[in-house]
Image: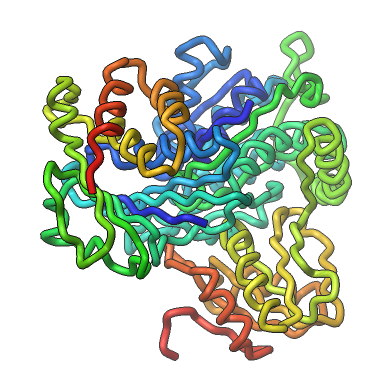
Amino acid sequence: MLTIATGNKAVADAVKDARPAVVAAYPITPQTEIVEQIANYVASGELGSRYIPVESEHSAMAACIGASATGVRAFTATSSHGLVYMCEMLHWAVGARLPIVMANANRALGPGWNIWAEHTDSLSMRDTGWLQVYVGSVQEAYDATLMAFRIAEHTNVLLPVMVNLDGFALTHITQPLETVDPGDFIPPMELPHAIDITNPVGYGTLTPPGEYYKFRWDIERSMRSAAEVIEETQAEFGKRFGRRYGATEEYRCEDAEVIVVAMGTLGKEMEIAVDTLRSEGVKVGSMRIRWFRPFPDLDLEGREVVVIDRDYSFGFGGIVAHAISSKYDVSIYSVIAGLGGQEVTYDDIAGFVRDRRPGEEFWFGVDA
Amino acid sequence: MYEIRLHSRGGQGGVTAAKMLALAAIREGKFATACPFYGAERRGAPVVSYIRIDDAPIKVYSQIRKPDLVIVLDMSVMETVDVLQGIREDGRVLINSPHQVDMQGHPTYHVDLTGIALSLNLVIAGSPILNTPLMGALAKMGFVSFDSVKDAIEETFSDKRNVAAAKLAYEGLGQ
């Protein structure tokens, strides 16, 4: 049904339609609407989940781990400080091979205290082993959250998935939303190592070096399989529901000599900049990276690349720019912009491309 | 693309007004987005909401810099906020006021939303409801049909007086 919703409402609706058995959550701006809306659905009986209001994000993830270990679907949502507070448990969910789905409203970390969009929170968790997808619209927030359950629970994956949406810029914007009846698109969850009280075994016991590395390799093997599962799931979603997604979203890239890369809402707004620049005769296209883990194959060979990072790794550089430079031998102009919700318009983005200085890093708004 | 900036005070329903207009536009087959600008606002503080309406999907997320229409739900915000900032040369203004207001030569419409809300006793926590009558004024200005406005209001609120308020504002819009 076509209606309107905020990004937060869209995530909550996708969770309702995926019917998790357990939702454990702690509110934090700007995701609070997600867990409030889910609580409403549970209270009204529209969603039959067990809702656990916990005392912290660390406990929220711990409760999801406990639930998921028994073989049932579990969901939580968080943001920023909440995400980094549950860091220990993020690693645990991966090592225990639990297909938990979590929404993260991307928000800057304090101090200075800041509640607006930035990707450093989730990107600083990139090495935990969680799959990460970054969405660019309300509709995509719904679709990606729904697909996240199927991808996470696929027998060749069995890893948790984090759906990232820009704080306020996407969590609080109202756009058209079409929900679907997922039917058997999301089959019942089957966890091969679910706790079985009739067959007691040890979980998470001391694992000596001779065994530990095998578990680590198995995580990486599943992460590599995940790319194929993501592709297959997105293709099946497109076939059933008519909306098609890739690991990236490319716009006017075919004959492009310059590609501008970003994630999240900036990755949508930059398409307008591409139209402007094209009308000026610049052969430019845009590539919005959707899946950051597993990191996708990008068609960048022989092109100049402008990367807009809404994040930073201090003493190193823009995280997306460096992910690309470590995989591809391309010339990159690294733009750091939008930190802490800094306003970045399509005109600004067009300016980044016009004034590009390959090989350099540029902090938008800073007089260097 | 048509861009609208709405000035109000926290608690006056500006955010919901933006959402209802977006809903009415979408019901007519258009594309629309509505977003509040969140700063350190709280109840009573001046707040801004944005509405964009277009025939194609909308890819912009940044704030509206050059509005086609400025709506002022509470004239007292004009004491501290330059509501005309960046308005297009041919931009219009809609003000909650019983009287004609001169807004530096911009075509300016006025409607007594506060009076309409009070006449129907549409008051929540001591504040008159301004957003549902506003929908009627916007229908009169031609952004959406009154039927779409009525549907959007009924989808958002169950109290029938909201549609009655929109009707009064539809009839009471002046220029």
Viewer-side residue, A190 vs B164: B164
Query: So how many labels did they put on this image?
Result: 0
Q: Is residue A25 visible?
A: yes
Task: Say if A57 sits above or below A228 in the image.
Answer: above
Q: Is residue A102 left or right of residue A151?
A: left
The quarter of the picture where residue A239 lies is: top right
Task: Say if A151 sits above or below B49 in the image.
Answer: above
Q: Residue at x 72, y 65 (%)?
A: A287
Q: Is residue A167 left or right of residue A68?
A: left
Task: Say if A226 sits above or below A312 in the image.
Answer: above
Q: Give how far across and how far down residue B44 sits, in percent.
A: 16, 44
Q: Give how far across and how far down residue B48 sits, in percent.
A: 30, 52
Q: Quadrant of the C terminus of chain A?
A: bottom left
State how the image is colored. rainbow
Q: Is residue B81 left or right of residue A291?
A: left
Viewer-side residue, A225 vs A11: A11
Q: Residue at x 43, y 49 (%)?
A: B51
Q: Give how far across and how far down residue A247 sits, in percent.
A: 78, 53
Q: Residue at x 46, y 67 (%)?
A: A339
Viewer-side residue, A9 vs A99: A9
Q: Quadrant of the N terminus of chain A?
A: top right
Q: Is residue B98 left or right of residue A260?
A: left
Q: Residue at x 47, y 34 (%)?
A: B24
Q: Give how far across and how far down residue A179 sits, in percent.
A: 65, 29
Q: Is residue A89 visible?
A: no
